[in-house]
Amino acid sequence: MPILAALAFFIQICFAYHALKTGRPYWWLFVIMAFPVMGCVLYYFIEVFPTTKESVSAEKAIRAFSKKLDPDKNLRERVADLEACGSVDNRLALARECIEHEMFADAITLYKSCLAGMYENDPDIRFGYANALELNSSFADAEAVAARLLQTHPKHHANEVRLVYAKALEGQGKLEQALPEFQRLADTYAGEEARWRYGALLKRLGKATEARDVLQSMLRRAERMPPHYRDAQGEWLELARENLQV
């Protein structure tokens, strides 16, 4: 018993020190010291666990499970919000949800409705509009909106805007114009999509050797990245492997 009591006291001291060091409210010291086991348990699950990787993973799993049970819940909520208040924020929230549900034409309408008054040249809204146009295969319009955004706000999410621009060019069959855009993005874009699209376009243009070099380099680079990065970029890495096997 004395050993268990000493161990419990040591754990209390560790939790109390953590509370002081991290700037938690002082009343946590009373909870921790007054209730040797329950106080430490409460402190851990209320103050410590939410900041851990395990908590983040658990939250993602819960969201994914909830989405499977009711995949349209967020969409209904955004529609209800817009019906209650037709603000720009609510229209944008619904537009983003429409993108998630592949309702690209509806997203285009919502983004376009926001481009008026003080929001006419808002770069975030224009980027969302260009992205929705490209996803809807309205490639000429997407090219025009993205090109203008690159001129008026060249530093605003430049790589993301340029990727939409490059995809819009490729979608119109302007392959020679799209190629240098993808080449530039292959070195600067955060993620593997741009590198895969560059390699795939090289292959499409009959430059098989260059395409293979790009895709192999992409896979080697990904192997040096943390596992969570490879998981997040799994779609593009798998496409690269498939292209190399053909």
Image (cartoon, rainbow, N blue to C red):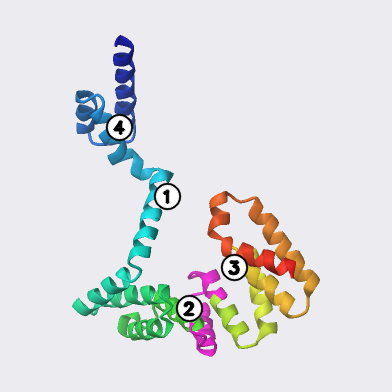
Mark 1 lies on residue: 57
Q: Disc 1 or disc 4, which is closer to the eye?
A: 1
Q: Disc 2 residue type?
A: Asn
Point out which mark residue 131 bears: 2
Look at the numbered disc 3 and give the secondary structure of its residue: helix
Look at the numbered disc 4 and give the secondary structure of its residue: helix
Q: How far apart are marks 3 and 2 (CA)?
A: 15 Å
Q: Disc 3 residue type?
A: Glu
Image quarter of residue 66: bottom left
Relative image position of residue 217 (x, y in whole percent): 72, 60
Image quarter of residue 54: top left
Q: Distance between the residues labelled 1 and 4?
A: 24 Å
From this viewpoint, is residue 163 visible? yes
Q: Does the magenta stretch include residue 28?
A: no
Is 130 drawn above or below residue 188 in the view shown?
below
Q: Disc 4 residue type?
A: Ala
Q: Distance between the residues labelled 4 and 3?
A: 43 Å
Q: Disc 2 or disc 1, which is closer to the eye?
A: 1
Q: How far apart are marks 2 and 4 (CA)?
A: 45 Å
Q: Disc 1 residue type?
A: Ser
Q: Earlier in the sequence, mark 3 or mark 2?
A: 2
Tell me the crowding category of disc 1: few under 14, some 14 to 19, or many 20 or more residues within 10 angstroms, Cα based: few
Which residue appears at 60% of the width and 65% of the height?
Answer: 236
Drawn side of residue 100 relative to residue 186, left or right: left
Mark 4 lies on residue: 19
